[in-house]
Structures are given as structure tokens and as C-alpha cells.
Amino acid sequence: MPTEPLSRGRIVAAAIDLIEREGADAVSMRRIAAELGVGVMSLYNHVPNKDALLNGVAETVLSQIEFTDDPDAHWTDRVRMQARAFRQIAHHYPRNTMLVVSRQLHSAAGLLPVERALATLRSAGFDGADAVRMLRMFIAYIVGSLLREVGVTPTFAPVQTRTINAEGVDPALFPEVSSLSALLDECDHEAEFDFGLELLIKAIEAHAGRREGTR
Amino acid sequence: MPTEPLSRGRIVAAAIDLIEREGADAVSMRRIAAELGVGVMSLYNHVPNKDALLNGVAETVLSQIEFTDDPDAHWTDRVRMQARAFRQIAHHYPRNTMLVVSRQLHSAAGLLPVERALATLRSAGFDGADAVRMLRMFIAYIVGSLLREVGVTPTFAPVQTRTINAEGVDPALFPEVSSLSALLDECDHEAEFDFGLELLIKAIEAHAGRREGTR
DNA sequence: GGAGCTTACGTACACCGTACGTCCGTGGTT
DNA sequence: AACCACGGACGTACGGTGTACGTAAGCTCC
């Protein structure tokens, strides 16, 4: 049985899989080659270098976001849905997410989400400049949220160690931190994400209303 | 003249300097040692390993944020000031910023900003749970913004290449992206940051008002 | 003067990305 | 059928990396 021929797609897929299983640090050309049962240098017939491979990983992960857009829904609901869809990658590919957000892509892979988001915001009545600003704000918030969510999970195994140990901080120096340590230690990522998301949506709704009012 | 003895502080400072001059990729134990005119292994007398060194870099950069807090100012102004202070590191240490935001610190280095922020939010009348949520939202937004700001400047030299080339996208497939390409290509980071910041502040102001109203 | 400590340093090992040369199976041409 | 050109798989090799380990030089205290 002739093994399926090597291809960029198979290599990227193996990299994604490896990252998800053992973390980004485990990725090396030799490791990926071994994973595919192939010589190291064979990879270079399909991928110019490691950096390009990781870009491929980021693009592939990004392109797997499932956007289900309902054009009939209220624009606030559509924004909500799109933001949540983005966050899904943190669930499907927690270890890969760090790669996606910390690597700016100069390709067209991430263009479709941008297109959808802009269309939604335009349909809400924002002009081009405002739509772009809103989009950037949402992306910043989403990226920052994902970073916290996956950053706190560098590896899956160890039970979440307290980031701020209540015993370790001097209540005299840090009264707020120490009195709120219980709240700071626990974090329901989904709830936190939704809280900020709702606030943002409310904010741009108000922004829209203000513009309408002064028209 | 006996050269000043090696120390963790000198090593971290050299690393920060090197990162700022040549980027994070240039950092290696050998390079830092050479920079200090010292043997490679001498570093390990003061730093357990490279990872810890980079944590030290992140902590040091973070601790150099200059917070000027005016307790008499309105809480919205204080929030604004603190958020802007955070963003300053992107100006002072653009290359190091990526390190700071992509590395979650389990130390107490970043505790002082947190303490100040919580105190400010509490003084605005938020209860503990809300204050923590607000703080997390702000941090997510700030981190995401900084990531965009410094991510777009991986190196300083090359003139900003268009991320989305107007000629490269099919207007039929991506009508919004292509018609807004001029706006998408340029980005005044400070203006964008402030725009989102104001929106966020307005949002939590409204949130506070709502709670007051229903009290 | 020695004992014990901290610190600087050289060597060595396993691993990394990848440039380069070689080999082989396949398809098209004569 | 014989040939050849070519693309893909692969081995070897080089310069770089983090760091474990052993050694040696200075310091302080008995």
C-alpha cells in the first residue's frame, strides 16, 4: 500500500495535531517528520521553512472558525454570534490559539471574518470609519480575552494553580487584591467573555444612538 | 578595575536592551553573555534557566510602568490615566511588549497595577465581583490593543507594508474589505486605543448608572 | 594555613533549522 | 523499447541552541 503522498496540507495538519497534543514547544521539523514517518528534509519540498509552516497552521486554524450568520437577526445578535464564533477556536484548539493570536497574518486567510464583521457593522448604520474602529476594538478585546484564556492553560494536566495566592500578598500593601483574592483566583472564562462582550455591544449601541440622535 | 560583578539585574537589563535593539529572536544565552563580556555558564549562577530570565524581563518591563494616580480626580479620569500608562510600555519597549503580554506571570510583579485599578473601580462604587470583571475586560482590551500595535512592528526598519492590499482582494468576494481598504490599511494606534477606551469607560459608566438606578 | 563557600568558566551533549547532494520512480519523447 | 528529464524523498553536515557537569580561582572564618 503506497502511503498517501506528502503534501503541505498533511504537514500542516500534523503540526496542528502535535501542537494540540504536546504544546507549541514540542514542534520541530524533525518531530513533525517523525510524526509523518518521513525524512526531515522531505518537508522542505512542500514548505519553504518553519516560519511559513507555522503561518500555515495559523491560517488553517483561523479558517476553521464556523460562522453562522443570520442576516435577518438584529445586528447586535449578529455581532454577538460572530464574536462567540471567534472564541470557539479557544475550545477546539486551545494550544494552537496562542499561535494564531500572536502571529499577524499578511495573507487573505482571515479576510472572511473581517468581511462579515464589517458588513454587519455597516448594516447597523455605522459609516466606514466607525465600522473599522469598532471592528478593531472588538478584535482587541477578543484577542486579549483569548490570550488570557489559553495563557492560563499552558498545559492541560496540572490543576490550576492559584495565580494570586491569598497567603502570599501583604494585606497592608495590597488591600484590594487580598480582599478580592477569591474572586481573582477563579475565572469562568465564558462568563467573563460574555460580560465584556455585552458591555461592548451596549457601548456601540449607545454610540449608534448618539449619532442617530444628532443627525 | 574590577568589572562590576554579575547579577540577575545586570543580566535582565542586558536582555531587555538586546531585545529592544535586535528583537526577541536575537536573544540567546550565548549572545547575552557576549554582550556582558562574560562566559555563558556564568549566567546560570544568577538565573536558573532561560525561561526564568524572560520572566524577569517581563516583570522588569512591567514594573517600570509609571502610574501617576490622582485620588481627587473623577474615577473615569483615573481609569483613563491608568489604561494609558499601561500603553506607554508599547512606546518605551516596543519589542519587549510582545514578551510581556504573551507570558503570564505568576509573580507579584504585576500586582501593583491591579491593586490601583481595583481601588479605583471600587471607589467608583462597583462591588468586588463587578470590579474584577471590569478589570479583566480592560486588561483584555489593553493587551489585545498592544498586541496589534507591536505585532505590526515586528521590526522597525521596513516601511509598513500594506496588510491588505487593495489590488489583492476581489471586490466581488469582499466588497466591504475592498471598499474600506484605505481605512483598514492605515492605523493611528493612539487614536484607535483612545477610541475604544472611551467607549469602554462610557460603557461601565452606564453600567454603574443602571445599578445606581435600580438600587 | 587551611576549610568551606560562592562564583566564573570550559567542555560536552542532545537537539534545532536548513543548505546541499544524491538517489529513485515516473512520464514523455524518440 | 530505450532514453532522458524531472520532481520528490532522503542522508549528511554545519552552525547554532539550552544547559548538565566538572574545575578552578577567589573570599571569609576558624
Image (cartoon, coloured by chain):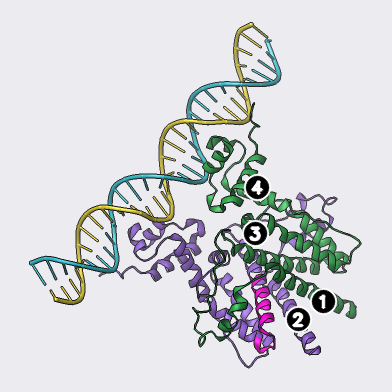
Chain colours: A green, B purple, C cyan, D yellow
**Residue A101, which numbered label?**
3
State the residue position of label 2: B202
Please, what is the three-letter code of the amino acid marked with disc 2? Lys
Using the rendered image, report if marks 2 and 1 lie on a common chain: no
Bounds of the magenta segment: B122-140
Q: Element at badge 2?
A: helix
Q: Name the residue nearer the viewer: A49 or B48.
A: B48
Q: Chain of mark 4?
A: A
Instruction: Measure the alpha-carbon separation of dots 3 and 2.
Output: 27 Å
Please, what is the three-letter code of the amino acid marked with disc 1? His
- The image quadrant where one finds the C terminus of chain A is bottom right
Q: Chain of mark 1?
A: A
Within 10 angstroms of label 1, few (less than 14), some, or many (20 or more) residues? some
**Residue A207, which numbered label?**
1
Q: Nearer the viewer, mark 3 or mark 1?
A: 3
Residue at 66% x, 84% y is: B121
Using the rendered image, report if marks 4 and 1 lie on a common chain: yes
Residue B203 seen: yes
**Residue A56, which numbered label?**
4
Instruction: Measure the alpha-carbon separation of dots 3 and 4.
Output: 13 Å
State if disc 1 and disc 2 touch (CB < 8 Å): yes
Please report whichever mark, 3 or 4, sits nearer to the chain's N-terminal start. 4
Q: Chain of mark 3?
A: A
Q: Element at badge 4?
A: helix
Residue at 36% x, 69% y is: B7
